[in-house]
Amino acid sequence: MTWATRGTACYSTTYEGETWFTAWCDLDLELDGVDCDPTCETVDRLEADLKTNPGALSSRTSYGIANVVTTGFSSVFTDIYLTWNTLCYRTQNECGNGKTGNLAPPHSGSMTPTSYVPLYGDTISHAYFMYALFIPNGSEYSDHAATGKATCMPSGSGSNACLYPSLLDHHPLR
């Protein structure tokens, strides 16, 4: 699967004289509920905002989910949940996954994406799905996006941290 990258690197730090970022912020997922009687209009918008602090063994993702419903309409979404996929190495092979329980908006929380293998000195990114059941037709809909690629600290560094580069041509962490 090809993952669209959304959001941006945030929270700068300096490592070996260069600027890096410790988190990926503002990764937004969105589902629109549309009523088409008599004309089509969005009456319900389900939104999730995620922030990830990547790690070589485990990462931390905080999220907030909101449901904005047009006055006079009821929510058209139910059975809402988030899933995560840890994408490892420069090839972005999946090396971990999981999901939340059923979420009722407004809701905020966190999840801990992990990897089946230690990623010290390697590359990591995270992909997320938001799923919801659309009540009017009983179908499940989803939106998905991924973070940028972060480089994890080398083995023996004593750190679980992975950092996002400030420049596209950054060299790997030493």
Image (cartoon, rainbow, N blue to C red):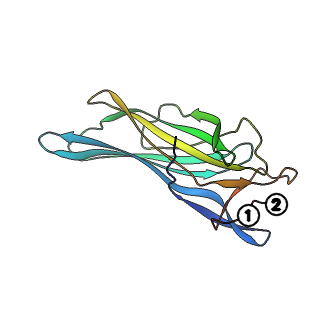
Density class for disc 2 (Cα within 10 Å; few <14, some 14-19, many ≥20) is: few
Foreground residue among 127 and 81: 127
- Identify the mark at residue 171; answer none if there is no mark: 1
Which quadrant of the figure contains the C terminus? bottom right
Query: What kind of element bears circle 1?
Result: loop
Residue 95: x %, y % from top left:
67, 37
Q: Answer yes or no: is residue 84 visible.
A: yes
Pointers 1 and 2 in contact (C-beta within 8 Å): yes
**Dividing the picture into quarters, in which one does residue 85 lie?**
top right
- Which residue is the extreme one toward the left? 38
Q: Is residue 147 left or right of residue 36?
A: right
Residue type highlighted by circle 2? Arg
Q: Position of residue 86 (x, y in %)?
A: 63, 41
Q: Circle 2 — which element?
A: loop
Taking depth in this image into account, of 152 and 58 the one nearest to the observer is 152
Disc 1 to disc 2, C-alpha distance = 9 Å
Q: Residue furthest front?
A: 91
- The structure residue drawn at horizontal position 60% and vertical position 51%, both measured from the top left corner, is 52
In the foreground, 77 or 83:
83
The three-letter code of the residue at mark 1 reads His
Q: Residue at x 30, y 36 (%)?
A: 76
Label 2 sits on residue: 174
